[in-house]
């Protein structure tokens, strides 16, 4: 904009000052239209733009007043002018999903195909749900790691057998009190990330041919684990904001001998939806009534978005997990520090309840023990007491990013795109026009070195063929914005081509 | 001895010098009888004993000459006097084992019971096959770990996804050339110790109900892994020195649809026996003929005992593994650095051949990746080039220990005890009198804070109920000697009590 105006500079301060403010306004409007400024983004202050364009302050004031009248920007007291979110720009969440019959997992090849593509080096990683290292406390971890290697040589290189380092289990038990769960170090088994925790819990509760229930959509890892154990999977309809349909789950439990219900409690991967305390309670009651077990994956649990941080009241006074309501040890809780501290440490844990013995046995003869140094490093980091402070800043950054990514998607993606409003985690779940294949989009995006995850792998059914998941825990910058713009263009092209 | 003689000191240099040398000889003989000096152990030099007992050198010379005449000691030129091994002290190896029919694993509870007992703190660990940290290069590992954490922060804390760090896989591929195996980094998958390697290979080749073949006795982990996957196990008779009976394996393959044969190639845990190159070749041919796969556990492979270190000739020119002979990618090779560098790092690997894709898939959805820092530390250590030097000194120490432990067992255990002569590894396998229960021995030994592993858990059958396994990679000292003496006494008591 600055350029096009400055070529007209000579005219400006002379005879056409009445039309000049309109010209400024028109070009700002075009910038907004083209996404140079996104919804909720601050535009330059009056003083700054006046200096930039070398026009008078009153001209800029007139231009901004016009834009306000047109509903394109609004003034915030003490803060300046911001691009207004259009009334029809409110994100529309994806619809309630469909359930199905129990069946063997059929997406193995597709899941592996996607992961092999996504793990390749790309310029912009909107694919794997891994926070960029700039979001994680690597400097602090390094200090703790060096401290630990300096003093505890034998502990570092000797085995720390299953169930894992006691001091680490103590730290974890202490933190579990934050979700109203009074457990002890003895109840906890340290694992190789949340992944091993889930795998061990599933191994110790199911046999080939058994049926498990999952949400629709669910983390594709649940499907793959089920496949590896020869299990059948039944999907339960789920709302992208409020989580699973209890009625549908009950119906499924009445019809089928479901052994285990596997769920991302806080917060769903991919929808970012939350199972609230009341629903958690319901789930536990259903599990009791039908004598099945729950495997609760809480890996995003410590990442509520800031708009969800208000102190809840009544039943919600504590940000509970499903296991908080577990009165007879049938919930197997799993989590890890891979999303909030350091994925490469591979430190996760489970609280397997009544299955503790069999989980330890299965671990003893598969991985035997988790590496000692990561366990010691994590203990030292947690004991240090800076984790909560780090979490606060992480949540703030992620909340900001989710806002910026959402705005960019709303701006650049074709009309009809529906978008999740996650309560936690750092991913967006998007429903594209019906005729867009997310697998095609994966390949087209790869040509531009952009990674995304196609929605098709989050279900055994075909209902998410036109969905995608975006990782938003990557620093927001021009390159990321351009990548989202490019995705929008490809989606539009695919939609037209397949029309 | 010194004390009893010194009280007689006043007489000694006066009138009874002719009987004095007999007295010295008698007390030395009693020391040998009581195991103060063990077979092949050096006794004090003439000069030293003369000084110690304050008697003349010629008296000691006379005493030693008498002991030589009695066949109790012998002189080695330039080296001094050594306790002679009695003709009837040659260790008799345990007999060839029995095979059996395929059946489900029944020892799970027993195996877990034993491991829970053995993992408890004891004063003398002759139980788990874990080298004492004084045998391992912890100081050097510490240096590498600190170097790695200082410079590679992002690599250290980010994921190193399956199949693992390429530079580590390159180091491993280079080392595999030592056993005549030309493989590349791409053929290798890094795992959480050898244990995960075995588990993944078994997962990717079998389904519940399948039959696998193992040696009898075999590592109890094989049985437990089979149990966890719902497999049936058939045991193949095995000689404690020369390994598996090829004829018996062939017969079993003709009779049963065996999917996989799992074997400790170099060297058997628990017998220390070795499958020579010719037998390795036979195994591969049989696998081909009957279209089954071999899972080769080579975890003790880099620990031949020094008596087996002579350069072999002809077919044995290279210390091969089974996979060396594999022409159609059906052998799945597994190993780790837990026995030779640092168990707590949990770094193992497999070369899964035709099953590589499914092994990576199974890993991706169970442990996802091995911790990054241990991978980087191990790479740095191996690149440094000191591993071979460390191995040489480790082998020397272990060879010496195996000799000392064997001698102590021969000395302190009741007649009829049969003892392995391991070709490699650092464990002894012993057959006790028929009526001694090794499980009873486990519990009795525990009362004296001594850990052993009862032989009963190395087979699905009952044929090793009176066997035990001893870990010899612990520093040889008076406490260890006393522990072995104590075990000998308990064995004798149990044998008499059950007679």
Image: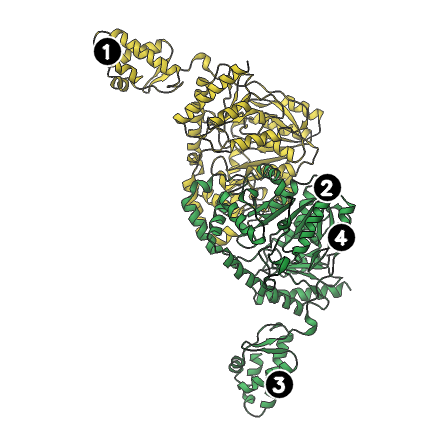
Chain colours: A yellow, B green
Kind of element beneath mark 1? helix
Question: What is the CA distance from the residue labelled 2 to the residue labelled 4?
Answer: 19 Å
Q: Residues within 10 Å of mark 2 (few under 14, many from 20)?
A: some
Front disc: 3 or 2 = 2
* Chain for disc number 3: B
Label 2 in the same subunit as label 4:
yes
Kind of element beneath mark 4? helix
Question: What is the CA distance from the residue labelled 1 to the residue labelled 3?
Answer: 126 Å
Q: Residues within 10 Å of mark 1 (few under 14, many from 20)?
A: many
Question: What is the CA distance from the residue labelled 4 to the residue labelled 3?
Answer: 57 Å
Q: Residues within 10 Å of mark 4 (few under 14, many from 20)?
A: some
| Residue highlighted by disc 1 | A12
> Is residue A468 something that shows in the picture?
yes
Question: What is the CA distance from the residue labelled 1 to the residue labelled 2?
Answer: 86 Å
Front residue (pair A23, A276): A23
| Residue highlighted by disc 2 | B210
Front disc: 4 or 3 = 4
Q: Residue at x 57, y 74 (%)?
A: B42
Kind of element beneath mark 2? loop
Pinpoint residue B109: horizontal percent, then vertical percent.
70, 48
Whether pointer 1 and pointer 3 mark residues with C-beta atoms closer than 8 Å, the reply is no
Kind of element beneath mark 3? helix
Pinpoint residue A121: horizontal percent, then vertical percent.
47, 33
Front disc: 1 or 4 = 4
Front disc: 1 or 3 = 1
| Residue highlighted by disc 4 | B248
Q: Which mark is residue A107?
A: none
* Earlier sequence position, callout 2 versus callout 4: 2
| Residue highlighted by disc 3 | B22
In the picture, the quarter occupied by the C terminus of chain B is: bottom right
Pinpoint residue B286: horizontal percent, then vertical percent.
71, 48
Residue that protrudes farthest toward the front in the picture = B314
């Amino acid at each position: 904009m600055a350029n096009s105006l400055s070529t007209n500079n000579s005219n400006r301060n002379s005879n056409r000052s009445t039309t000049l403010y309109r010209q400024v306004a028109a070009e700002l409007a075009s910038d907004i239209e083209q996404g140079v400024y996104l919804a909720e983004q601050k535009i330059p202050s009056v003083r700054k733009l006046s200096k930039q364009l070398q026009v008078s302050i009153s001209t800029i004031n007139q231009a901004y007043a016009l834009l306000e009248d047109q509903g394109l920007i609004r003034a915030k007291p003490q803060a300046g002018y911001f691009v207004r979110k259009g009334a029809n720009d409110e994100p529309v969440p994806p619809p309630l999903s469909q359930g199905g019959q129990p069946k063997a997992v059929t997406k193995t090849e597709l899941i592996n195909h996607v992961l092999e593509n996504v793990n390749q080096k790309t310029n912009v990683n909107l694919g794997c749900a891994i926070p960029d290292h700039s979001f994680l406390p690597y400097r602090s971890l390094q200090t703790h790691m060096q401290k630990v290697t300096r003093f505890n040589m034998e502990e570092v290189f000797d085995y720390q057998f299953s169930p894992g380092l006691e001091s680490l289990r103590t730290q974890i038990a202490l933190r579990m009190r934050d979700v109203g769960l009074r457990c002890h170090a003895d109840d906890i088994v340290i694992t190789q990330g949340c992944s091993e925790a889930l795998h061990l819990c599933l191994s110790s509760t199911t046999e080939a041919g058994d049926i498990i229930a999952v949400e629709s959509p669910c983390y594709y890892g649940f499907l793959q684990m089920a496949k590896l154990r020869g299990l059948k999977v039944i999907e339960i309809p789920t709302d992208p904001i409020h989580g699973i349909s209890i009625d549908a789950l009950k119906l499924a439990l009445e019809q089928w001998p479901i052994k285990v219900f596997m769920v991302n409690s806080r917060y769903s991967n991919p929808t970012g939806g939350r199972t609230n305390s009341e629903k958690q309670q319901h789930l536990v009651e259903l599990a009791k009534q039908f004598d099945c077990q729950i495997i609760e994956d809480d890996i995003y649990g410590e990442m509520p978005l800031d708009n969800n941080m208000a102190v809840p009241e009544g039943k919600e006074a504590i940000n509970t997990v499903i296991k908080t309501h577990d009165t007879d040890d049938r919930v197997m809780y799993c989590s890890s520090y891979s999303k909030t501290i350091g994925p490469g440490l591979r430190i996760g844990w489970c609280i397997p309840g009544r299955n503790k013995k069999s989980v330890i046995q299965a671990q003893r003869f598969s991985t035997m023990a988790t590496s000692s140094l990561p366990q010691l490093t994590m203990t030292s980091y947690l004991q240090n007491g800076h984790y909560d402070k780090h979490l606060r800043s992480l949540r703030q950054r992620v909340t900001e990013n989710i806002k910026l990514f959402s705005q960019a998607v709303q701006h650049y993606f074709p009309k009809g795109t529906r978008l999740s409003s996650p309560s936690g985690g750092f991913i967006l779940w998007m429903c594209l026009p019906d005729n867009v294949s997310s697998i095609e989009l994966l390949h087209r995006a790869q040509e531009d070195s952009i990674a995304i995850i196609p929605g098709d792998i989050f279900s055994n059914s075909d209902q998410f063929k036109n969905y995608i998941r975006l990782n938003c825990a990557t620093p927001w910058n021009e390159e990321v914005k351009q990548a989202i713009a490019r995705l929008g263009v490809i989606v539009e092209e695919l939609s037209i081509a397949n029309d």
